[in-house]
Structure formats: structure tokens, C-alpha cells
Amino acid sequence: MKKAQEHENRQCSICGLHYKDKELAEECHAWCSTHKSCNLKIATQSLEAQKRRFDGN
Ligand SMILES: [Zn+2]
């Protein structure tokens, strides 16, 4: 079987952002479930935000 679950652990199931650290994903999930919005400080550490930076906006 694939290691899909391991990947899911690093995704915030609320906002859908991915993180390289499970802790960050949990932090994001905790924030999202409480505040119903993204914490910019956490979101900027998501893989999506970092990829965007590499794409050279
Ligand atoms: Zn989130």
C-alpha cells in the first residue's frame, strides 16, 4: 500500500495546506479549528507558500 497516510499527517485537514513537519500541520489544524482562519505565520511555512516563493512571483 502507499504511504498516503503519512502524507495526510502533514496536511491540515481544515485549510488543506501541507507542511514538512507534522508539528506544524498540527499547529495549523489547531489554529484553523479555533479561529476558522489561517495564521499567516504558520501558513507561510506551508509547502504551498514555499513553493510559490520558489516559482518567483
Ligand atoms: Zn490549517
Image (spheres, helix red, strand yellow):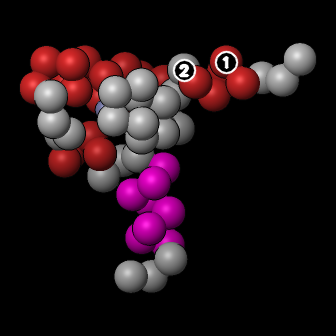
Residue at 15% from the left image edge and 28% from the top image edge: 36
Question: In this view, which residue lies farthest toward the right?
Answer: 1
Residue at 37% from the left image edge and 20% from the top image edge: 26
Image coords of residue 2 (percent x, y): 84, 23
Residue 45 drawn in magenta = no
Residue 49 drawn in magenta = yes
Quarter of the picture containing the N terminus is top right
In the rendered structure, are the residues bearing label 1 and label 2 in contact, judged by CB atoms less than 8 Å apart? yes
Image coords of residue 11 (percent x, y): 48, 30
Q: Residues within 10 Å of mark 1 (few under 14, many from 20)?
A: few
Q: CA distance from mark 1 to mark 2?
A: 6 Å
Label 2 secondary element: loop
Magenta segment: 47-54
Image-based side of 2 in relation to 8, left or right: right
Q: Main secondary structure of the magenta part?
A: helix
Image coords of residue 10 (percent x, y): 52, 28
Residue 25 seen: no
Badge 2 is on which residue? 9
* Ligand 1 lies in quarter: top left
